[in-house]
Image: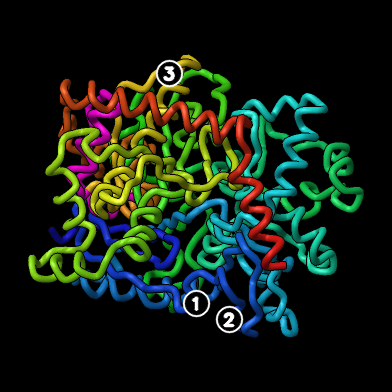
Amino acid sequence: MEDDKYVVGVDYGTLSGRALVVRVSDGEEVGTAVHEYPHAVMDAELTATGEKLPPEWALQVPHDYREVLQKAVPAAIKAAGIDPADVIGIATDFTASTPMPALADGTPMCEVPGLESRPHAYVKLWKHHAGQAQADRINALARERGEDWLPRYGGFISSEWEYAKALQILEEDPEMYERMDHWLEAADWIVWQLCGEYVRNACTAGYKGILQDGDYPSEDFEAALNPAFKGFAASKLAHRIGQLGERAGGLTAEAAKWTGLPEGIAVAVGNVDAHVTAPAAKAMEPGQMLAIMGTSTCHVMNGDSLVDVPGMCGVVDGGIAAGKYGYEAGQSGVGDIFAWYVKNQVPGRYFDEAEAAGKSVHQHLTDLAFEEPVGAHGLVALDWHNGNRSVLVDTNLSGVIVGQTLATKAEQGYRALLEATAFGTRVIVETFNAAGVSVTEFVVAGGLLKNPHLMQLYADVLRLPLSTIVSDQGPALGSAIHAAAAAGAYASVADAGEAMGRVERGKYQPNQEAADAYDRLFAEYQLIHDYFGRGANDVMKRLKAMRKEAHS
């Protein structure tokens, strides 16, 4: 149609950025393009100097994010075959918490001449866990003082979030801390690059920046952590808050040149990859838990009332949608665990067999694994290879497989890890239910929904109907929906989601026989979960400490 209008959603993932062109009237996806970050994730060495990085570090280069705008957006418009003049808005989403230090004008500290060799000048990716010691102190002090914001985060502040990472900079590179004017999320920095306005989005400000009821932690609290940290929020964190789906500003002339889009079109307030997906999956009602399953999993759900859920990542008023309390939980390793196992634990013959069969090694292992009935492998695993985000909130935990023998096969270990991630999700769901925030439907988005065995496994383990988003690009579609709202094409994000979102309701239903069998395995999972995770045996933490000592 001649009067069709379009929006662009840009999803910034861990390793790449994806641009998606979407028709405003019905959510039809008409063009997409991906740009891989040239520097990927710096977790072993700093690219600029070759300096080795300590364990638990994960950094990125902000210019890689600009390149997504310069390369992926024009490529997506070209693939769509549309007139750029018909684009009315653009929105972005990001991994989180992925904060960075910047000057007052938004210049990243790593782009300041002479600072490119300083690790703390770079973006700290969500899986940068080197601030765990700072997070431990934040939590201990908050409990000691009875800070009323702590229960809003399940009783724990993560090392992945803004405060622990900033405190790490102060204590390891105080000059960098003093020189930075802003400590801001990459989600907000990229919007600043697009519209020339620094607007702090309500989602990350609440979930990752400890903004509750309009206030950050007090200066007394900051000073008690470290006298030099006093005034952190007021001087480096606090800024104008933008609500999700609002217009942050208009596309600048420079950004218009980068993207090929019309100057002045709506740029939406930034968002997080998980939360932005809710309207795309039509998971906006209380009880509908959305899991974005990829390298990690983030669980988000709206609720009508404010409840403290132990071990959740947070609850924020308007954190997912205006007028509702947005709940978040998560697992810090899911797809990453499966990839690690395939890369490091699978014999070469499986790769040969997969190639001969014309399928991926992951698919080959899955097919082999599910030829056996539940429990036939005699294994149970803990999905903590990248720590535990919910409900234990402890990055010092690590993975384990119990029950291996000389007869254990690679596909059996692989299935045990698939099951472990489902059991970890069940712990989260049961914790929410016990707190009075009922989960009645499980909705999945993300790359892992392409594995039907895994989806059925989750339905069986959770004993819940499992719905799946129709789009392969949930976060990018979610961003596009927010762009449509910011451009005024719809009255709200919810209205835009109803018109543009897509979901297949109840695609997977729990199988009673399998669910009963998984209950037995889950009981064993719970035993080792609590044994290793709740203080009965801290061997994982002692081993991790030994590893750090050996690398120091």
Read off the residue under disc 2. Answer: 47
Crowd around label 1: few <14 · some 14–19 · many ≥20 (10 Å): some
Q: Is residue 251 left or right of residue 457?
A: right
> Residue 315: percent from the left, percent from the top?
55, 30
Extent of the magenta region: 450-475
Residue 467 in view, yes or no? no
> Residue 517: percent from the left, percent from the top?
23, 25
Between disc 2 and disc 1, whose residue precedes? 1
Crowd around label 3: few <14 · some 14–19 · many ≥20 (10 Å): some
Q: Is residue 440 above or below residue 549?
A: above
The residue under label 2 is which amino acid type?
Thr
Residue farthest toward the front in the current orientation of the protein: 406
Residue farthest toward the right in the current orientation of the protein: 227
Residue nearer the viewer, 86 or 91: 91
Residue nearer the viewer, 466 or 496: 466
Crowd around label 2: few <14 · some 14–19 · many ≥20 (10 Å): some
- Seen at 19% across and 47% down, the residue is 369
The residue under label 3 is which amino acid type?
Asn
- Seen at 63% across and 31% down, the residue is 535
Q: Is residue 406 left or right of residue 247?
A: left
Q: Is residue 263 left or right of residue 42?
A: left
**Do the numbered discs 2 and 3 sit on residues whose CB atoms are within 8 Å?**
no
Read off the residue under disc 1. Answer: 39
Q: Secondary structure at mark 1?
A: loop
Between disc 1 and disc 3, whose residue precedes? 1
Residue farthest toward the left in the current orientation of the protein: 357
**Do the numbered discs 2 and 1 sit on residues whose CB atoms are within 8 Å?**
yes
Read off the residue under disc 3. Answer: 433
Residue 459 magenta-highlighted:
yes
Exactly how many numbered labels are in the figure?
A: 3
